[in-house]
């Protein structure tokens, strides 16, 4: 629930709100152009010189035009669960096409979940060779501390 001083964005937009640059980008919840599950909005935002992109319930790999709207980006939140979103192999492809400094897998199986999602390990298996860090529940970082020359995978605690 949003607080009284909150602004909620749920559609494509390009604006600056309270010092945060926000761009919403159209995408689809399935690989059939939204025929099965409709549209989703990818949100790219910048805060204090750091850029973030949340792919939401993305259901397809991205074309060059969409990648150009997103990249470059410091943090990419990418679904990997393969039910109602892209799966591990497509997530790897999306991460490689965007090339963020940090990729954060999301929308994967956790204990007690009733939806049949793939576990995060399936994604980690297909991105072998990249640095993978288990980072806890929250992270403090300085822009200068972010990796250069390749994407790191940060997995937050469940």
Image (cartoon, grey):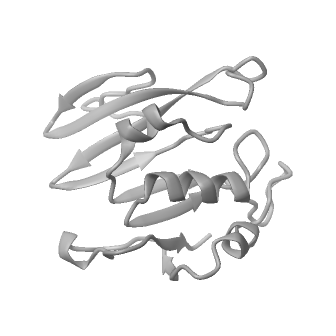
Of residues 37 and 129, the one nearer the viewer is 129
Of residues 2 and 46, the one nearer the viewer is 46
Q: Is residue 79 visible?
A: no
Quarter of the image for residue 67 reads: top left
- Quarter of the image that includes the C terminus: bottom right
- Give the residue furthest to the front: 64
Q: Is residue 10 visible?
A: yes
Q: Is residue 3 toward the left or the right of residue 38 in the image?
A: left
> Is 37 located above or below residue 85 in the figure?
above
- On the image, the x and y values in percent for residue 98 come to 45, 52
Residue at the image point whose x is 20% and y is 40% from the top: 20
Residue at the image point whose x is 32% and y is 51% from the top: 72
- On the image, the x and y values in percent for residue 123 come to 69, 66
Quarter of the image for residue 81 reads: bottom right
Quarter of the image for residue 101 reads: bottom left
- Give the residue furthest to the top: 35
- On the image, the x and y values in percent for residue 157 come to 57, 73
Residue at the image point whose x is 56% and y is 39% from the top: 62
Q: Is residue 12 toward the left or the right of residue 36 in the image?
A: left
> Is 78 located above or below residue 104 in the figure?
above
Residue at the image point whose x is 67% and y is 73% from the top: 124
Q: Is residue 66 toward the left or the right of residue 113 in the image?
A: left
Of residues 121 and 68, the one nearer the viewer is 68
Label tally: 0
> Is 48 located above or below residue 7 in the figure?
below
């Amino acid at each position: 629930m949003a607080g009284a001083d909150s602004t909620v964005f749920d559609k494509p937009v390009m604006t600056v709100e309270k010092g945060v640059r926000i761009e919403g980008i159209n995408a689809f919840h399935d690989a059939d152009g939204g025929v099965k599950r409709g549209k989703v909005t990818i949100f790219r935002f910048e805060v204090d010189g750091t850029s973030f992109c949340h792919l939401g319930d993305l259901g397809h790999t991205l074309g060059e035009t969409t990648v150009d709207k997103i990249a470059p980006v410091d943090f990419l939140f990418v679904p990997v669960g393969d039910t109602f979103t892209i799966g591990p192999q497509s997530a790897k492809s999306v991460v490689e096409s965007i090339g963020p400094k940090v990729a954060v897998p999301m929308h994967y199986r956790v204990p007690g979940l009733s939806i049949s999602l793939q576990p995060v390990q399936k994604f980690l298996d297909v991105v072998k060779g990249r640095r993978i860090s288990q980072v806890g529940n929250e992270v403090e970082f300085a822009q200068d501390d972010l990796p250069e020359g390749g994407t790191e995978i940060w997995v937050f605690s469940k």
